[in-house]
Image (cartoon, grey):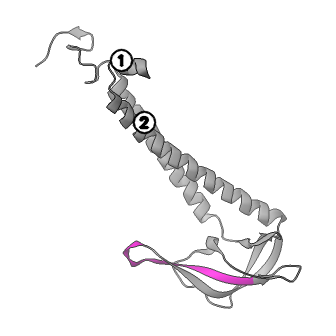
Amino acid sequence: MRAMIEDGIPAFGLLVSAFLVLVPAGVGLFMIYRGLRHWNRARRLIATGERAVAVVLDNAVESHSHGRMSFLPVVTFRTQLGREVRTVIAEKRSNLSHVPGTQHTVAFDPEQPERAVPIDGQGAGMAGAVIVGAIFLLFAGVAFFMTSLIFLSPDSPVFDDGTFGDFPGTFP
């Protein structure tokens, strides 16, 4: 990197390039990782986890910008060992209130029953995380291409040696 700076690429250009490429790429990879990890956990629990019928007791309300709100069902269910569990099912987030008494079948790990997942209708948040992560990676790729053209091309303004392309000469 020191050789690149001595060859005429300013440190500011490298910092801008690194910021425009590495930050979105890191965010994108993290979102994809979290989305796929959550999807894999839900898929595994649905296939091999213990199941129970959960009953909606109440709604947990999340406030968002511009006065928007999301409702998450607060449910209760019993494990096969008789333990009563009360938890929020984040995968059932909705902009409508969940009706108390509504039943949902959930799958869960008997050692962590409070992390239950519904066996139906889950996955929208996971797919959204993967899609947004892919968009961040696409932005990072475009930013890498553009910063490479701007800062690494011999014809770029960074390499102002009085020539333009293959035509020597000075320009005002």
Badge number at residue 18: 2
Quadrant of residue 68 within the rendered picture: bottom left
Question: Residue 2's spot in the image, x, y percent?
Answer: 42, 21
Dot 2, how many residues are within 10 Å of its Cα: few (below 14), some (14-19), or many (20+)?
some
Badge number at residue 84: none
Dot 1, how many residues are within 10 Å of its Cα: few (below 14), some (14-19), or many (20+)?
few
Specify the segment rendered in magenta.
65-76
Left or right of 123: which side holds 66?
Answer: left
> What predominant SS class does the magenta segment belong to?
strand
Q: Is residue 71 magenta?
A: yes
Question: Foreground mark, 1 or 2?
Answer: 1
Looking at the rendered structure, the kind of residue marked 1 is Glu
Q: Quadrant of the C terminus?
A: top left
Q: Residue at x 34, y 27 (%)?
A: 151
Helix, strand or loop at label 1? It is: helix
Give the residue number, with chain letter if any, for mark 1: 6
Residue, far front: 2
